[in-house]
Amino acid sequence: MVRLKDLYKSKVAPGLKEEFGYTNPMAIPRMEKVVISMGVGKAVQDKKYLESAKKELTMIAGQMPAVCKAKKSVSNFKVREGQETGLKVNLRGVRMYEFMDRLINLAIPQVRDFRGLNSNSFDGRGNYSMGLSEQSVFPEINTAKMESRQGMNITFVTTARTDAEARKMLELFGMPFKKSESQGV
């Protein structure tokens, strides 16, 4: 079984139940999915950027990404409606927990000058979004063969009703949030 799924059952769920006083076990927040997305604007000029980004995102996520097309034409960015400009992957179940484990324990510690994740990136409904400036922090990516640096957005979708519940759940999973001024720096 996946390590973070075991952690959820043994530590996270009981901790949330104790702190927020849930009486029904189905009311305890849980991870629903993780969405990884990449904007590949360079693909407008050259298709090889899209193919290399697709290959690297496949290695990171463990499944093929969906190609996103532009919904509108934007002349300043030289983008036409229908052009392939992005990639996204929805991870659920075992792949989601494996990705979260690699992100928390391997990738985030590799980020240069890391001082904690921004705790203001919750959307008000219990979902958390973060960004990485380059994909080379993941151990699957060979930096010698990497053609271009590409950032990515990662969104954690939870069943939590409030940001406080979601933050506590992610903290129990091991997410390194910045200490706020009220907690002491």
Image: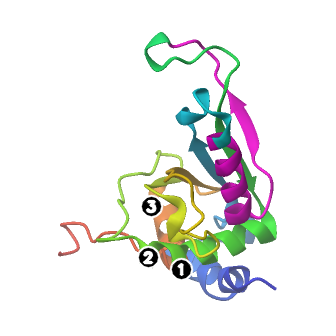
Question: Would you say 144 lies left or right of 133 here?
Answer: right
Judged from this view, the residue extending furthest toward the bottom is 10
Q: CA distance from mark 2 to mark 1?
A: 7 Å
Q: Which residue is mark 1?
A: 106
Task: Give how far across and how far down residue 171 sits, in percent.
Answer: 47, 74
Residue flagged by tag 2: what amino acid is it?
Gln
Q: Is residue 48 left or right of residue 173?
A: right
Please name the amino acid that badge 1 sits on. Answer: Leu
- The residue lying at 61 percent from left, 68 percent from top is 141
- Regarding residue 127, the answer to whether it shows in the image is no
Q: Residue at x 56, y 54 (%)?
A: 147
Determine the image quadrant of residue 145. Answer: bottom right
Give the x, y percent position of residue 64.
80, 52
Identify the residue at horizontal 70%, vertical 18% (top origin).
82
Report the span colored magenta.
49-74
Residue annotated with mark 2: 110
For label 3, the residue is 164
How far is mark 3 from mark 2, CA to CA?
A: 27 Å
Determine whether label 2 and label 1 are within 8 Å by CB. yes
Q: How many marks?
A: 3
Q: Considering the numbered disc 1 on the image, is that residue within a helix, a strand or a loop?
A: helix
Judged by depth in the image, the label closer to the viewer, 3 or 2, is 2
Q: Pointer 2: residues within 10 angstroms few (<14), some, or many (20+)? A: some
- Residue toward you, 92 or 105: 105
